Amino acid sequence: MTIEVTIFATFGIMVGLMLIGIPVAAVMMAVGVGGGLLLYGPSFLQSAAAVVWSVLNDDLLTGIPLFVLLGELLLRSGMADRMYVALAAWLSRIPGGLLHTNISCCALFAATSGSSVATAATVGTVALPALSARKYPIRDSLGSLAAGGTLGILIPPSVNMIVYGSLTQNSIGKLFMAGVVPGLLLTCCFMGYIFAASLWRGERRQESVPPLAERLRLLIHLVPPLVIFGIIMGSIYLGIATATESAALGVVAALLLTWMSGRLSLALLRNCFVQSAKISGMVLLIIVSAFVLNLLVSLSGVAGELTKWVTSFGLSSTEMLLVLIAFYLLLGMFMDAMSMLVATVPITYTLVTELGVDPIWYGIFIILMCEMALISPPVGMNLFVVHGVRPDKGGIEDVAWGVLPYLVIMILFTCLLMAFPALATWLPRAA
C-alpha cells in the first residue's frame, strides 16, 4: 500500500468514525495512539505523554478559557439586548431594515465573544422575536443570523485562531490583527447584499425610528463592547500585552462593566464559570488529541511524503488554494468547524507553506473555511443553533436556504483575499 493510499484511507476512517457520532477528540486520540503503538510500540506512549504535558502547560492556551469566560460574562450581562436596540435605532431605516441590525450586532458581539455559536445564539435570541413580529421573511431572518454568527471566529478575539496558532506555532497576536480588516470587509459584504437584495425586490419596509436625542442616548450601549475590543486589540498592537494577557485584561474589564450595569451576582458568576469550564474542557481535549495525532504524523514522515506527492503535480499556490476551497466545502458538509480545523491543518499547512503561502494569511483562509463549514448543510452548527432559537416550529430547510447567498459571498470573498492578500497581512506587518 502506497503512502498516499494509507493517508487517504486513514483520513477516511477518521471522517467515518466522526460521522457515526464518535467524538472528534476520541477519534483523533484513538488513531494517534493506535497508529503509534503499531509503528513504534510502547515507547510511543512516553513521547505522547511528554507532548500532552507540554501542550497543557502552554501559556498560549490559557487564552482559550479566558476568552470563553469573557464571552459568557457579556452574554449573561444582557449586553446583547441593549446593543441590538441601539443598532436598530440607527440602521432600521436602511433598505433591509433589521437584517442590517442582525449583521452589525453579530459583528460587534464577535469583537468580544470569540465564538461563532455563542454569537449566533445570543443575537438570534434577541433578534428573532422582533423580526417575527414585524413579518420579516423567515428565510432572510434566519440566514442573516446564521451567517452573521460566523463573524464570531473571524473578527478577533477568536478561539479558532488560538487553536490554529497553537497547532502551527504562529503568533496569536498577529492572527488577531490579520482578522480585523477581513472581518470588517466581510461584514460590509453581508450588509451590501442585504441592501441590494432589498432594492431588487422593491421592498419598502419602514421601521419606526426614535427621535435623534433618543438615538444618541442609546449609543451608550455600544460603548462596552468597543471598550473591551479596544483593550484587547490595543494592548496587543501596542506591545503592552500578549494575546493571553490581553484576554485577562478583557475579563477584568468585562467584570467591571457587568458590575457597573448592576447585573453582577454570585449566581451569574457561577453560571459563567461552569459553562466556561465545559466549553474550554471540550476544546482543550480536542487540541491535546490533535497534538498526539500530529506526533504520529511527524514521526512517520507522512507530512513530508504527502507534500512531495502533491507538489509533483506542479500546482501553483493559487491552484492549490482553489483545490482546498473545494475540499473544505465538501468536508464542511459533514464535519463541524473545530473538528475540520484540527484534523486537516497539520497536513494542509505543510502543503501550502511549501508553496510560499504566508502562514498568517493561511490562518485567515482556514478561518473562512471554518465559517463556511458552520453554515454548510446538512451539519453546519450555526444552522442548528439559529433553528433552535426560532420562535415558530418551521423546518431547518428555511435556515439552509437562507444562508446560501452568504455562502456564495464567502467563497467570492475568499477569492478576493487570494487576489489581494495584503488585506489580511498589512496590519500584522505594520505592528
Image: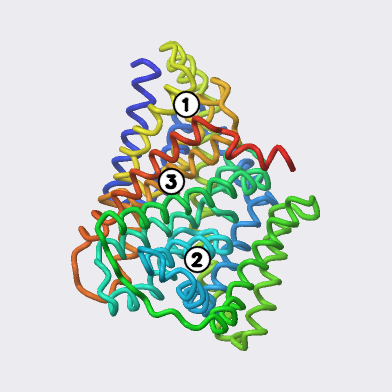
| Residue 283 position within the rendered picture, expressed as x and y whole percent measured from the top left | 51, 55
Q: Write the residue at 34% across / 53% down.
A: 196
CA separation in Å, label 3 and label 2:
21 Å
Furthest residue to the right? 240
**Colour style of the rendered protein structure:** rainbow
**Mark found first going from the N terminus, 3 or 2:** 2
**Residue found 43% across the figure and 17% down from its top:** 310
Q: Earlier in the sequence, mark 3 or mark 1?
A: 1
Q: Residue at x 36, y 15 (%)?
A: 2
Q: Secondary structure at mark 2?
A: helix
Mark 3 touching mark 2, by CB under 8 A? no
Distance between mark 3 and mark 1 Cα atoms? 32 Å
* Residue position for label 2: 278
Residue 370: numbered disc? 3
Examine the rendered structure and indicate whether residue 113 appears above or below residue 7: below
- Number of residues whose C-alpha sits closer than 10 Å to that of mark 2, classed few (under 14), some (14–19) or many (20 or more): few
In the rendered view, would you say 319 is above or below 140?
Answer: above
Q: Amino acid at mark 3?
A: Cys
Say whether disc 1 or disc 2 marks the residue closer to the N-terminus. Answer: 1
Tell me which amino acid carries mark 1.
Leu
Q: Secondary structure at mark 3?
A: helix
Pointer 1 residue: 39
- Horizontal and vertical percent position of residue 16: 29, 41
Identify the element where label 1 is drawn.
Answer: helix
The numbered mark at residue 308 is: none
Say which residue appears at 46% left-offset and 68% top-offset: 91
Indicate the position of residue 87 as horizontal and vertical percent values. 49, 71
Is label 3 or label 2 in front? 3
